């Protein structure tokens, strides 16, 4: 297994280049060349800015970005990813360079490279995705604030050097507020506005390079007498060729320094892994990749090579760059060949522009980095955290403040510790419930209970009732402590019979969060609770009219033709709550599948085309093939139901083989595609999506959103570089 994985990693010409051979290969290569050229022109000023903000020379950013583009294209795990210097590394590298030299940084990067290579061979790429979104958004906000503070002296034209930590920077600004240069402020603000305007005009315009050119012209003409600080004044001349071998400082490898080296290397690994894997996932979704998907473990292998080779050639740690990757996709890139072209073209352009790049005013560099900081966090990402509740909001806020006031690694690690402790306590509290358990704990008798044995409380069975089997008539199974948090629908109505009961169900509004999407040609009827980023496709029918209520967890998808229905008065109990159908998170229900309650479907499960699930409990991470039928059984977690199989006895269910990693990765890709489709349909519709209660053409119904504000299309602001 390990040898096969290593062979796969060492082959640079894998399936990632498959799209070059589709159609006219010459035209496909030309598309990659054009994408490489556009991104090279965008990347040059950004690379200079990131390098200088990190305490390094501008040419180190140019050379490093070019080498990273080539190495990542050869050894990475994504078709489209563009590698280069990124804003997230600025506080980490800046802290290292404040007290050490470049040789020490090269050593830390080499250690990080070894750690990344070991992680890729051990297959830890999938675990990076377990970092909660609230922490990712929180440390991104913290890094953005740190970058903005680090560039405050350049933006305000203050000549004195500020300290590194945030408190020292704020104190420095207070002390030197009277020494700011209005011309520098105008140049910085003008740079931000020019980039923003040009990117709205066309992605083909290298907006940062144009902004720098305008800044050079102004400082050499109308602002020549203002003595604005230029790149040349701080760093001297920029050499046309700056690639040379810079070996690691082996003399730093002492017992005294070992802890510091490992600390800094761990911070580099964390940023590299998070950024590159998020970028790779985004790239596949943005490009609508239907071929070879990104490989998270091979992506970490590529990052290991970037960490080993780029600093050795006078660079510094780089990773996947989100907005540059988005740019290369938007201008037509098809394969990693675009990254190779970016390397060659970037070095060539820098060679001829070196004498002009040293004339760039530092205020323009500060303006570029201010633009980057302003666009690092999107409003929709914050809304997604808000949708997960107050606990995640506080975790996001804590992470941001900790990164600003302490440093990146201590801030993130402390936030992760808080998250883990919180989850352990939460699971412990859920586990303390009488019916708690990871697996279904009981199948209850069918006879009706004794009079008065069941009591309804807001449409749910109370916890006291859960502890007594005799009180659980018509309950398919009792579950608790499952991976997915249940969410309560609106308060229940009084018990009625016959058509009045069904009419009551039909009239109940669905609960649809703003990030979910229900197609106008789909039907969602009755008490249905949708999680965030759920996608209900055209032709799907989710009918909580006879049996109710239903829950569909976050990032799950209900594809075309899927039917979800349930028998009356039959339920599963999840965390003491009564559900006719309960679907966990990241569940895919493929075209024409039938899910009929009472049933429970665990997280990360794939229900194949025309498959049937009825009166069943399905564990997490299961995979159902085409036309598979599961009726009246409990399927243990992680099982593979072959295509066409009929699983109608518990012995058959227990004998099912385990699903492999290829099935799990397939479902992950389906989930990511459908999350992207939900966003795309939102942008296409430009109207509120939440027709709840009954959603479909020419139908009116009640609407209930999880938040008071109606959905609005994402803002048109350009992505962060």
Image (cartoon, rainbow, N blue to C red):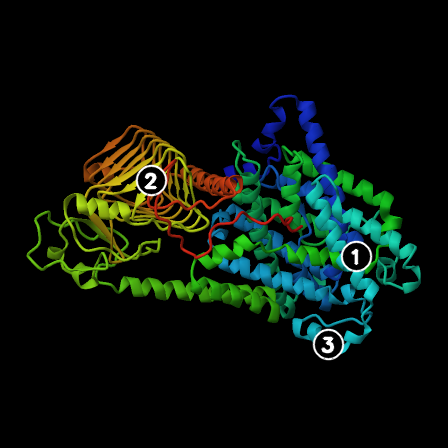
Q: Which residue lies furthest to the top in this view?
A: 24
Determine the secondary structure under disc 1.
helix
Name the foreground residue: 420 vs 146.
Answer: 146
Determine the secondary structure under disc 3.
helix
- Of pointers 1 and 3, the one earlier in the residue sequence: 3
Name the foreground residue: 263 vs 356.
Answer: 356
In the image, residue 544 above or below residue 164 = above
* Residue drawn at (61%, 68%) of the image: 404
> Residue 398 vs residue 553: left or right?
right
Residue 47 visible in image: no
- Report which residue position mark 1 lands on: 364
Answer few, some or many: residues within 10 Å of disc 3's Cα (few below 14, many 20 plus, some between 14 and 19): few
Mark nearest the camera among 2 and 3 is 3
Measured Cα–Cα span from mark 1 to mark 3: 22 Å
Answer few, some or many: residues within 10 Å of disc 1's Cα (few below 14, many 20 plus, some between 14 and 19): many
Instruction: List x then y, in percent, for residue 465.
Output: 16, 60
In the image, residue 51 above or below residue 10 = below
Instruction: List x then y, in percent, for residue 346.
Output: 77, 42
Instruction: Kindly check if marks 2 and 1 are in contact, taking CB atoms under 8 A apart as contact.
Output: no
Measured Cα–Cα span from mark 2 to mark 1: 57 Å
Measured Cα–Cα span from mark 2 to mark 3: 63 Å
Instruction: Kindly check if marks 1 and 3 are in contact, taking CB atoms under 8 A apart as contact.
Output: no
* Residue drawn at (73%, 55%) of the image: 192
- Of pointers 2 and 1, the one earlier in the residue sequence: 1
Name the foreground residue: 77 vs 721.
Answer: 721
Instruction: List x then y, in percent, for residue 201.
Output: 71, 42
- Report which residue position mark 2 lands on: 658
> Residue 91 vs residue 532: left or right?
right
Q: Which residue lies furthest to the left in this view?
A: 450
Q: Residue 174 carries which label?
A: 3
Determine the secondary structure under disc 2.
loop
Instruction: Kindly check if marks 2 and 3 are in contact, taking CB atoms under 8 A apart as contact.
Output: no
């Amino acid at each position: 297994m390990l040898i096969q994985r290593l062979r796969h990693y060492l082959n640079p010409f894998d399936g990632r280049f498959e799209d070059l051979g589709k159609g006219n290969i010459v035209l496909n290569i030309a598309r990659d060349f054009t994408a490489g050229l556009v991104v090279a022109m965008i990347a040059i000023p950004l690379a200079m800015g990131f390098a200088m903000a990190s305490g390094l020379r501008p040419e180190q950013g140019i050379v490093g970005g070019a080498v990273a583009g080539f190495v990542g294209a050869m050894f990475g795990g994504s078709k489209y990813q563009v590698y280069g210097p990124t804003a997230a590394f600025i506080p980490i590298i800046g802290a290292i360079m404040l007290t050490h030299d470049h040789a020490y940084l090269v050593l830390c990067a080499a250690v990080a490279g070894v750690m990344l290579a070991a992680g890729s061979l051990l297959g830890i790429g999938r675990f990076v995705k377990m970092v909660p979104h609230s922490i990712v958004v929180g440390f991104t906000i913290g890094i953005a604030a740190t970058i903005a503070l680090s560039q405050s002296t350049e933006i305000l034209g203050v000549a004195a050097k500020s300290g590194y930590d945030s408190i020292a920077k704020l104190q420095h600004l207070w002390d030197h507020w009277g020494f700011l240069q209005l011309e520098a402020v105008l140049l910085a603000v003008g740079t931000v506005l020019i980039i923003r305007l040009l990117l709205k005009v066309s992605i083909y315009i290298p907006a940062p390079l144009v902004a720098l050119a305008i800044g050079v012209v102004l400082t050499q003409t109308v602002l020549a007498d203002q003595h604005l600080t230029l790149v040349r004044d701080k760093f001297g001349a920029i050499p046309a060729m700056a690639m040379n071998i810079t070996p690691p400082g082996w003399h730093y490898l002492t017992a005294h320094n070992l802890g510091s080296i490992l600390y800094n290397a761990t911070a580099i690994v964390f940023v590299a892994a998070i950024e590159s894997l998020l970028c790779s996932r985004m790239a596949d979704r943005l490009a609508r990749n239907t071929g070879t998907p990104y490989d998270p473990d091979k992506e970490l292998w590529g990052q290991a090579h970037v960490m080993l080779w780029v600093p050795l050639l006078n660079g510094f740690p780089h990773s996947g760059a989100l907005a540059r990757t988005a740019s290369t996709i938007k201008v037509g890139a098809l394969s990693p060949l675009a990254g190779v072209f970016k390397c060659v073209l970037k070095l060539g352009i820098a060679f001829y522009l070196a004498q002009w790049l040293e004339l760039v005013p530092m205020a323009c560099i500060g303006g570029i980095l201010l633009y980057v900081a302003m666009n690092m966090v999107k409003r929709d990402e914050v809304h997604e955290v808000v949708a997960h509740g107050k606990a995640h909001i506080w975790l996001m806020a804590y992470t941001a403040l900790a990164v600003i006031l302490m440093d990146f690694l201590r801030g993130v690690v402390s936030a992760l510790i808080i998250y883990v402790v919180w989850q352990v306590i939460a699971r412990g509290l859920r586990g303390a419930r009488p019916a708690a358990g990871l697996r279904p704990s009981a199948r209850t008798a069918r006879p009706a209970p004794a009079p008065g044995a069941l009591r309804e409380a807001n449409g749910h069975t109370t916890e006291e009732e859960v502890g007594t089997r005799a009180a659980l008539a018509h309950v398919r199974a009792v579950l608790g402590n499952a991976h997915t948090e249940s969410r309560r629908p609106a308060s229940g109505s009084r018990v009625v019979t016959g058509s009045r009961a069904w009419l009551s169900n039909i009239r109940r509004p669905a609960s649809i969060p703003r990030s979910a999407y229900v197609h106008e040609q789909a039907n969602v009827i009755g008490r249905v609770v949708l999680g965030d980023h759920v996608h209900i496709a055209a032709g799907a029918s989710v009918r909580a009219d006879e049996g109710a209520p239903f829950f569909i967890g976050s990032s799950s998808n209900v594809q075309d033709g899927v039917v979800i229905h349930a028998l009356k008065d039959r339920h599963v109990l999840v965390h003491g709550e009564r559900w006719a159908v309960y679907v966990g998170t990241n569940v895919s229900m493929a075209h024409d599948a039938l899910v009929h309650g009472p049933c429970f479907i665990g997280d990360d499960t794939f229900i194949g085309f025309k498959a049937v699930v009825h009166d069943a409990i399905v564990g997490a991470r299961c995979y159902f093939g085409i036309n598979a039928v599961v009726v009246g059984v409990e399927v243990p977690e992680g099982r593979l139901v072959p295509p066409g199989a009929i699983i109608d006895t518990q012995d058959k269910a227990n004998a099912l083989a385990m699903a492999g990693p290829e099935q799990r990765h397939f479902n992950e890709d389906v989930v990511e595609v459908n999350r992207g489709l939900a966003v795309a349909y939102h942008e296409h519709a430009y109207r509120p999506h939440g027709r709840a209660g009954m959603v479909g053409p020419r139908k009116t119904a009640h609407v209930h959103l999880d938040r008071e504000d109606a959905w609005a299309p994402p803002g048109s602001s350009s992505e962060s570089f």
